[in-house]
Amino acid sequence: MPSLTTRLFVSHLLVAVVGALVTFAVVRVAAPALFEERAPGPGGGRGRTSPLREVVADAVTTALLLGVLAGVIAAAALGLLASRRLLRSLRSVRSGTRAIATGDYRHRIPVPPESELAAVAADVNDLAIRLADTEARRVRLLSEVAHEMRTPLTVIDGYAEGVLDGVFAPAELVQIEAEVGRLRRLADDLSTLSRAEEGRLDLHPTDVDLSDLVGQVTARLRPQFDDAGLTVTVHPPSRPVVVWADADRLTQVLTNLLGNALAATETGGVSIDVTAGRDVATVTVADTGEGLDPDDVERIFERFYRVPSRRRGEHDPGSGIGLTISRGIARAHGGDLSADSAGRGHGSRFTLQLPIRGDHPIRR
């Protein structure tokens, strides 16, 4: 198959040749007749002698041949120049995509002057930025997972050596069991996180009374709030709010939100509001705890990100992916999970939104 350069050159040349031939034919036929009709002389120019007409025809023919030749040469030169310029831009885009395909996500394609190719180059550059961000998150995730596993493995290794050396009694194996359980929970959380981010969460939706579900989760966690000296108040709607959702997954989200509120609150309590609009059901969990800095409001949904705790002087002790998973579950239901806070010391508020119509899409 001919190259794009050859095809562009031939197309320009054919256009020039066809245009020149049409022009030649029209002028060759019309020019002598027009000359005889409009030339001054007896009879208004009609009946002009044949030799003069032939002279005019020959002159026009010669001029047209020279014009056609010059036009074809100029069209060929300009076509070759345009095709090479276009091919240069295409080669730049091609080399850039090859560099990105080999993992050089820092490579940027120069924006060519052609608007269509400029749009393609901009899209490829945007793709490179997104791929670089994905790769950075992948590397960071591997580092964070390794860090999360290092502590329980170190504890297990220390207790195992102590038991083998006779320093610890066999009863201390319970500590090893606890750390193994922590690793198992981390593995389960990572598996759920991976499925949530890939849109492969295993959901079993049914009609769920959201107000009733909130009441069940709150009743189960209320003893922990009582032990901490905190109040937990539910403000149910005046009528049932039924959503098409996976009750177990929503329980996981609500448990995480209430658990985080319990961990962040020292005095006061937590208020839970369930409301329903025309298309959206909302569960708002508001606490009187430490609150969030503006920079933390969105970052808390990042994997393994922990907000420094003023109460303990350290990071929160969870795995750091609970809120990431919770948002993934909410979005898998066609909803969302967001957070806001007036700042440190002013508490936090988490808002879970779910569509209440039964025809919304649920990713399975």
Image: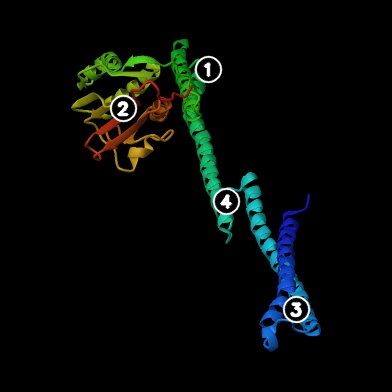
Residue in front for this viewpoint, 8 or 197 = 8
Report helix, strand or loop for mark 2: strand
SS for dot 1: helix
1 or 4: mark nearer the eye: 4
* Between discs 1 and 4, the one toward the N terminus: 4
> Residue flagged by tag 4: what amino acid is it?
Val
Q: Left or right of 32: which side holds 292?
A: left
Residue type for callout 2? Val
What mark, if any, has residue 120 been given in the picture? Answer: 4
Residue behind mark 3: 60
Distance between the alpha carbons at the discs numbered 4 and 2: 39 Å
Query: Does residue 211 sit above or below 291 in this rendering?
Result: above
Q: Which mark is first along the chain, 2 or 4? A: 4
| Res. 77 in view | no
Q: Amino acid at mark 3?
A: Val
Of callouts 3 and 4, the N-terminal one: 3
The image position of residue 332, as x and y in percent, is: 43, 26
Disc 1 marks a residue whose amino acid type is Asp
Residue 49, image quadrant = bottom right
Q: Is residue 333 above or below residue 18?
A: above
Mark toward the viewer: 3 or 4 = 3
Residue 82: image quadrant is bottom right
